[in-house]
Image: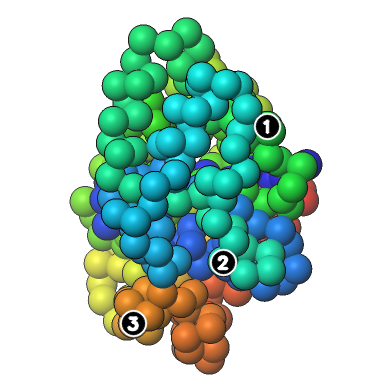
């Protein structure tokens, strides 16, 4: 059965999509069958995978609407990127999903029921979410076993983190008691700046070192890699972001194996 991990933060620009895409790719290259689910109508994970959202005629929106009508998950909605790495892509229609779900009974568990049909085919399901708390993000949280919150190391991001933790506690208490908080992923960390170091220290003092993943250092190679529709470890195998992401994936697998 697949291990389902959601990357979520109410604040945009946290590096959430970059982390989700690169983690999924690294897990796949380690021999794991991995599915990346793009639940953000901006479709940045889809673009990062080298796909053009406006050409996606049957993405996650269409797949979920079809599932609501037929109660069957359609495998044709999943695109294989390489041997072990697949994506359920997004297009602009995903922004209408909130309206589709609004009047449906048990609307918070639609994605969970959909993924149950697919989880035997994968070792990991990684879900990227929009920077907001609506029915789409709630569905992603309810469908997942584990939550990682990426946080850019600046003070404004701490506000988004506080909101996201409150969202986690509510979903955990009311909708998905099995959702475990794996920790915070400090993103775009620059040890040369006081602000990055102060934010990292504050995160550690608030949550404890066991709730922090190894920081992902700021690296222009990450943006260059996304522009070439490549994970950074394939674009620049020896850069610092690749080193940090490999450590992150090892930590992620270890925390999952230890059950959070």
Q: Which residue is mark 3?
A: 224
Q: Secondary structure at mark 1?
A: helix
Q: Secondary structure at mark 3?
A: helix
Q: Residue at x 48, y 58 (%)?
A: 20
For residue 83, the mark is none
Which of the two discs, 2 and 3, labels the residue nearer the N terminus?
2
In the rendered image, residue 236, in percent from the top left (x then y), is placed at 48, 89
Which of the two discs, 3 and 1, labels the residue nearer the N terminus?
1
For residue 116, the mark is 1
On the picture, is 6 further left or further right than 90? right
In the rendered image, residue 5, in percent from the top left (x then y), is placed at 58, 46
Q: State the separation of the CA atoms marked 2 and 1.
A: 22 Å
On the picture, is 241 further left or further right than 228? right
Quarter holding residue 23: bottom right
In the rendered image, residue 37, in percent from the top left (x then y), is placed at 51, 48
Query: Is label 3 in contact with label 1 (beta carbons under 8 Å)?
Result: no
Q: Nearer the viewer, residue 184 or 60?
A: 60
Residue 216, visible in the rendered structure: yes
């Amino acid at each position: 059965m697949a291990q389902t991990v959601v990357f979520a933060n109410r604040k945009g620009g946290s590096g959430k999509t970059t982390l989700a895409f690169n983690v999924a790719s690294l897990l796949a290259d380690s021999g794991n069958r991995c599915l990346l689910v793009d639940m953000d109508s901006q479709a940045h994970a889809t673009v990062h995978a080298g796909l053009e959202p406006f050409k996606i005629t049957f993405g996650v929106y269409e797949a979920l609407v079809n599932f609501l009508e037929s109660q069957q998950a359609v495998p044709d909605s999943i695109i294989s990127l390489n041997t072990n790495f697949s994506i359920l892509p997004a297009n602009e229609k995903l922004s209408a999903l909130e309206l589709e779900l609004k009047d449906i009974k048990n609307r918070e568990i639609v994605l969970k029921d959909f993924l149950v049909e697919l989880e035997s085919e994968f070792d990991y399901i990684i879900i990227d979410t929009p920077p907001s708390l609506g029915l789409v993000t709630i569905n992603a949280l309810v469908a997942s076993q584990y939550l990682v919150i990426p946080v850019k190391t600046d003070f404004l991001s701490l506000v988004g983190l506080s909101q996201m933790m409150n969202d986690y506690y509510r979903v955990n208490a009311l909708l998905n008691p099995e959702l475990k908080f794996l920790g915070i992923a400090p993103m775009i960390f620059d040890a040369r700046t006081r602000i990055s170091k102060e934010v990292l220290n504050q995160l550690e003092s608030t949550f404890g070192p066991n709730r922090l993943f190894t920081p992902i250092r700021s690296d222009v190679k990450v943006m260059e890699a996304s522009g070439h529709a490549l994970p950074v470890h394939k674009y620049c195998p020896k850069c610092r972001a690749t080193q940090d992401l490999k450590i992150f994936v090892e930590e992620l697998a270890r925390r999952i194996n230890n059950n959070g």
